[in-house]
Amino acid sequence: MTENDGRDEDGSGRALVRNWSPFGEGVGVALWTSFIAACFETMVVFAFFDPVTLGLDGFSPPLLALRPILYAFGFFFFWFFAFIGTSLTAYLLESGPHAALRRRQSTDG
């Protein structure tokens, strides 16, 4: 048996429940929502624009091979900026004037 085989301290085999820290929860929510937003943005933008033909009159076959790389670059570009936006939103929610009141209400009840 390994040291971390999913058993509780008493060896009962019950699932361990671990609470996320507020920071970890915020990062997880920001990553997930920005991922969903980047998926949607990628679908919309690349439905109308082909990355190979943007700004190019004639393109060569080697450039056509770069199309998947350009789609991936576009997706990560959108994901990065969506993550910045969601992270900023999470930060503003946690540092706003009513943040202490929300934290107190969540611990009381």
Image (spheres, rainbow, N blue to C red):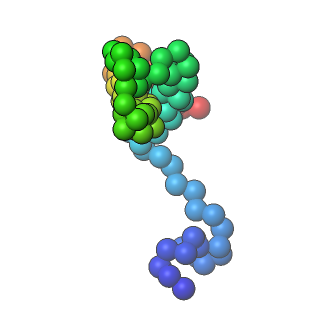
Along the line of sight, the residue nearer the viewer: 43 or 91 = 43
- Which quarter of the image is occupied by the C terminus? top right
In the rendered image, the residue lying farthest to the bottom is 1
Along the line of sight, the residue nearer the viewer: 72 or 10 = 72
Give coordinates of residue 103: x percent, y percent: 45, 28
Q: Give above or below for 103 relative to 23.
A: above
Q: Is residue 50 visible?
A: yes
Residue at 51% from the left image edge and 49% from the top image edge: 19
Residue at 47% from the left image edge and 46% from the top image edge: 20
Give coordinates of residue 8: x percent, y percent: 57, 71
Give coordinates of residue 37: x percent, y percent: 51, 24
Q: Quadrant of residue 31?
A: top left
Along the line of sight, the residue nearer the viewer: 7 or 31 = 31
Residue at 54% from the left image edge and 85% from the top image edge: 1
Q: Is residue 97 left or right of residue 20?
A: left
Give coordinates of residue 21: x percent, y percent: 42, 44
Q: Is residue 90 visible?
A: no
Number of numbered markers: 0
Residue at 53% from the left image edge and 15% from the top image edge: 48
